[in-house]
Image (cartoon, grey):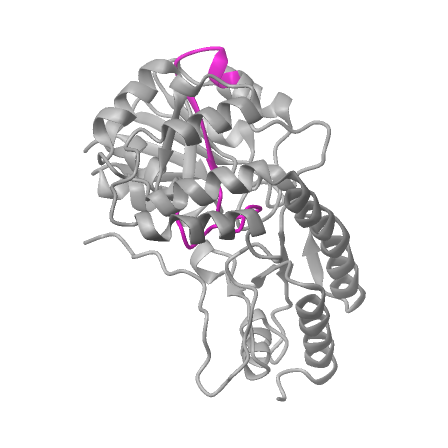
Amino acid sequence: MDIRPYVGGESALEGVSRVIKLSSNEGALGPSPKAMAALAELGPESHRYPDGGATRMRAALAAHYGLDPDRIVCGAGSDELLGLLCRSYVGPGDEVLQSEHGFLMYAIAAKASGATPVKAAEIDLVASVDNLLAAVTPRTKVVFLANPNNPTGTYLPTAEVARLRAGLRDDILLVLDAAYAEFVTAEDYSCGNELVDQGDNTVVCRTFSKIYALGGLRLGWAYCPAVIADVLNRTRNPFNVSAAALAAGEAALADGDHFARVKAHNDAWRPWLTDKLAGLGLTVVPSVTNFILVRFPQQPGKTAADADAFLRRRGVIVRAMAGYGLGDSLRITIGTGEENEAVAAALAAFVASGAEG
């Protein structure tokens, strides 16, 4: 009962017929047309159980990324896999370590397994390897690192992640949550697959909820050492991924044209929105993802809470960050061009008028 339930981004506002939802980092352009066609084709077979081993999906992922399919485990979103890793490797008396402003589900997964979540301070909203290593105790069993991080949008270079792995005991599991990896263009970034291949104590988790825009179907996957894949396959539910998610996921993965459109859209609009809001005098944290974190002053009438209320009155939903210890910030998803222009115009009006609505 010490767990505070996770609350997703809102989708509706009372009295508002057309809502611009920029609160959940969902794909701005929606799912691949091929994925939607696969869903329609599946319809008449919906009475059949799915492939419990996600065999075709794992084979497609392995071919796409050059991985061993036997070391891929699929889940109902990466959230399920994060929970399974905690359930499998930690218990009462253990500690689960994460960076200060890491994804809220890490602490929930730890507590659900009876473990204690521990946070290490970040530096300028970037995870600190030194602070993470300093927070390790004999009770530390799992370290979660979101890279890139949600909600800050920042990342650690490959060399820093390797330094973190090298500084941890061999009996500590490092879980790299790479939900936003596809958006990163930095040459010094890696999702971490090479670390998985180097030992038996690192896992990389991925998702189809972001760049592939299949959040409603719940499809994630983990690349693991063979011994950890074996454990996850023993502890997961037998049909944990729906047939719909598997069919759509396989089709989305094969649709390179749609992937390229989504990537190009984000590459163009993220800097556009960043520049627009920075031009208003707001602080925008440099992001490599499909969202930006915007910081507001503490001046009455100009705060993040005031801005959030102002946007809501105009039908725009973004994500308040108080739950992440960032009460001065709002997280804004990169939406369609029209949506990005709308939120920029609304925040311009807010800056000009304060909290007056």
Q: Out of 239 and 132, give the one closest to the viewer.
A: 239
Q: Does 306 sit above or below residue 63? A: below
Question: Which of the pair 267/250 is nearer the observer?
Answer: 250
| Residue at 41%, 60% in the rendered image | 8
Instruction: State the image quarter where residue 78 is shown.
Output: top left
Q: Position of residue 235 (x, y in %)?
A: 22, 29
The spot of residue 93 in percent (x, y) is 21, 31
**Res. 188 image quadrant:** top right
Identify the residue at horizontal 47%, vertical 18% (top origin). 196
- Residue 22 percent location from the top left of the image: 57, 64
Residues drawn in magenta: 195-219
At x 37% / y 23%, what residue is drawn?
A: 173
Q: With 278 as the anchor, is 242 left or right in this view?
A: left
For the N terminus, which image quadrant? Answer: bottom left
Q: Is residue 255 left or right of residue 245?
A: right
Relative to 3, say whether 70 is above or below. Answer: above
Residue 2, given in percent of the width and then of the height, sits at 22, 52
Any magenta on residue 199?
A: yes
Q: Main secondary structure of the magenta part?
A: loop
Image quarter of residue 323: bottom left
